[in-house]
Image (cartoon, grey):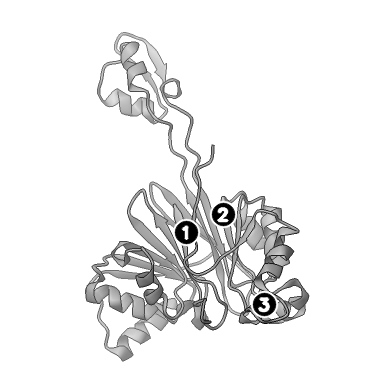
Amino acid sequence: MEVTFLGTSSGVPTRSRNVSSVALRLTQRGEIWLFDCGEGTQHQLLRSDLKTSQLKKIFVTHMHGDHTFGLMGLLASCGLGAHAENVEVYGPPGIEPYLKACMKYSYTYFPYGVNINTIEPGVVYEDQDFIVTTELLKHRVTAFGYRITEKDKAGKFNVEKAKKVGIPFGPVYGKLKAGETVTLEDGRTFIGSQFCGATEIGRKFVYCTDTVFCENAIELAQDADVLIHEATFAHQDAEMAFEKMHSTTTMAAQVALAAQVKQLIMTHFSPRYAPGNSLQMSDLLKEAQSIFPQTVLAYDFFRYEIPRRR
């Protein structure tokens, strides 16, 4: 699992930062899941090493334009030459009428499957490998945070050990690998865990933006391997953060600390902290690290590989 930041500015793009979008590449299955899709996201994808043809899911946090204005353009381009197919879009109330209105008035037809799903708190998607859950955050409009949980996998099956004790090759190997207890025809009983390595613990990815500090963000981020959290404002601008329902650096760090996450990556920065201003990005990093040392700042095209737990 690898994260690529395609846009890390808040509200409007800058010379060095596009508006919100984060890609999660599931390398084990050749898929890309996109979180938010601000204006220009498809251009950012073209500048990255990500393949649009691998795009399978788009998760939208809320309907503000800096998180949605690139959605229609990206989906339209996918139909014109990116060879995408069966793209699932998940988002808050409003996502379906918005996209259908865009399609109607731009006379756009998708020659591939696009399924639009309106979400509610709880599980919004599950397959054999992953569970996607959401919780309401605290913003000026309905906004959701997302948690992607990779399911635990059984450890590697020791074929040689099974052969050595005389277990005949066949379907029984699959049962043992799944952790089942198997009784052979000769009456011997074997427990699957005796022939498997340590269980591979699934990784946990959490994405929270836009929101002021809230308990739901902590609940969503519990024990996450990586938490991506907005940090629009510096701590000294907390009054403005509460007014606009966004987070400060210290709010993001407090969520990470309370949830005991492994790594915090902050994003969605206000342009007011650009070079030349009294407060710089380095100051924002220091504020967060004073509370939660395992913090880094995202920038456009920053990549982070989520390590497996040992």
Give the CA separation, mark 3 to mark 2: 23 Å
Pointer 2 residue: 226
The mark that comes first in sequence, 3 or 2, is 2
Crowd rating for badge 3 (residues with CA inside 10 Å; few <14, some 14–19, many 20+): some
Residues 197 and 215: in front is 197
x and y, in percent, of residue 278 in the image: 73, 80
How far apart marks 3 and 1 lie (CA) works out to 26 Å
Is residue 11 rendered to the left or right of residue 50?
right
The amino acid pointed to by label 2 is Val
Residue farthest to the bottom, as pictured: 105
Q: Position of residue 171 (x, y in %)?
A: 27, 26
Q: Kindly indicate whether the residue at mark 2 contacts the one at mark 3 (C-beta within 8 angstroms).
A: no
Asked if residue 182 can be seen in this view, the reply is yes
In what quadrant of the picture does the C terminus appear? top right
307 lies above or below 267 = above
Q: Which residue is mark 3?
A: 245
Q: CA distance from mark 1 to mark 2?
A: 10 Å
What's the amino acid at mark 1? Val
- Which quadrant would residue 188 be assigned to in this image? top left
**Residue 105, image x, y percentages:** 32, 91
What's the amino acid at mark 3? Met
Is any part of residue 63 visible from this angle? no
Identify the secondary structure beneath mark 2.
Answer: strand
Task: Indicate left or right for 54 with 303 as reference.
Answer: left
**Pointer 1: what residue?**
3
Residue at image point 67% right, 71% down? 247
Depicted 108 relative to depicted 36: above or below:
below
Could you say which is closer to the camera, residue 155 or residue 3? 3
Q: Mark 1 touching mark 2, by CB under 8 A? A: yes
Q: Which mark is residue 39?
A: none
Tell me: 160 left or right of 207. Answer: left
Q: Is residue 153 above or below residue 140?
A: above
